[in-house]
Image (cartoon, rainbow, N blue to C red):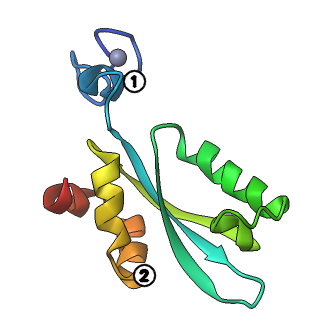
Amino acid sequence: MPSCTKCGAYTRYENGLCRNCYYGKKSKAGKVYFGEVTFSDGKKKIYTGQTKRSVYQRVGEHKENQYEHNTKTYTGRGVKFKLLGSIFSGNRFKAEKTCKTLHSGDKRKLAKYGARKFRENYY
Ligand SMILES: [Zn+2]
């Protein structure tokens, strides 16, 4: 497995840098993720979020909010949070904004298949 020439972390590129080293510490790089929130009346909505940490860590916080019935947060009002998928972006804030304007069907598609296409179109 190739590793970063600067810090030794995993990278896809032989003799290259990992994402953190490549984009720098104050980087806006990170992941945009999609989750399906189910509400107590059975209605479902797609939540779009961004994080520079692990997506699973972030999703864990959403689930915690639901467990604690933290109604101050959008996801906390739901009863279930299911991660649909995530994509990497060099500017996760911009990518999140773009993703939020999509229709829920497109969000689902993007979460499932769209990583490569997203990079070409919206990066
Ligand atoms: Zn590195």
Residue 5: image quadrant is: top left
Q: Quadrant of the N terminus?
A: top left
Q: Give the residue type at disc 1.
A: Tyr
Q: Which residue is mark 1?
A: 10
| Residue drawn where x is 70% and y is 63% of the image | 72
* Residue 44 percent across, percent down from the top left: 61, 84
Secondary structure under the numbered disc 2 in the rendered image: helix
Q: Measure the alpha-carbon separation of dots 2 and 1.
A: 33 Å
| Residue drawn where x is 60% and y is 47% of the image | 58
Q: Is residue 73 left or right of residue 21?
A: right
Q: Nearer the viewer, mark 2 or mark 1?
A: 2
* Residue 61 percent across, percent down from the top left: 69, 50
Residue 123 versus residue 111 in the image, above or below: above
Q: Which residue is mark 2?
A: 104
Q: Nearer the viewer, residue 116 or 62?
A: 62
Q: Residue furthest front?
A: 72
Residue 123 versus residue 107 in the image, above or below: above
Which mark identifies residue 106?
Answer: none
Q: Quadrant of ligand 1?
A: top left
Q: Nearer the viewer, residue 11 or 6?
A: 6
| Residue drawn where x is 38% and y is 10% of the image | 7
Q: Earlier in the sequence, mark 2 or mark 1?
A: 1
Q: Is residue 58 left or right of residue 30?
A: right
Q: Is residue 95 visible?
A: yes
Q: Give the residue type at disc 2.
A: Ser
Q: Residue furthest left?
A: 120
* Residue 52 percent across, percent down from the top left: 45, 38
* Residue 81 percent across, percent down from the top left: 67, 67
| Residue drawn where x is 65% and y is 66% of the image | 75
Q: Label 2: how many residues lie within 10 Å, few (<14), some (14-19) or many (20+)?
A: some
Residue 15: image quadrant is: top left
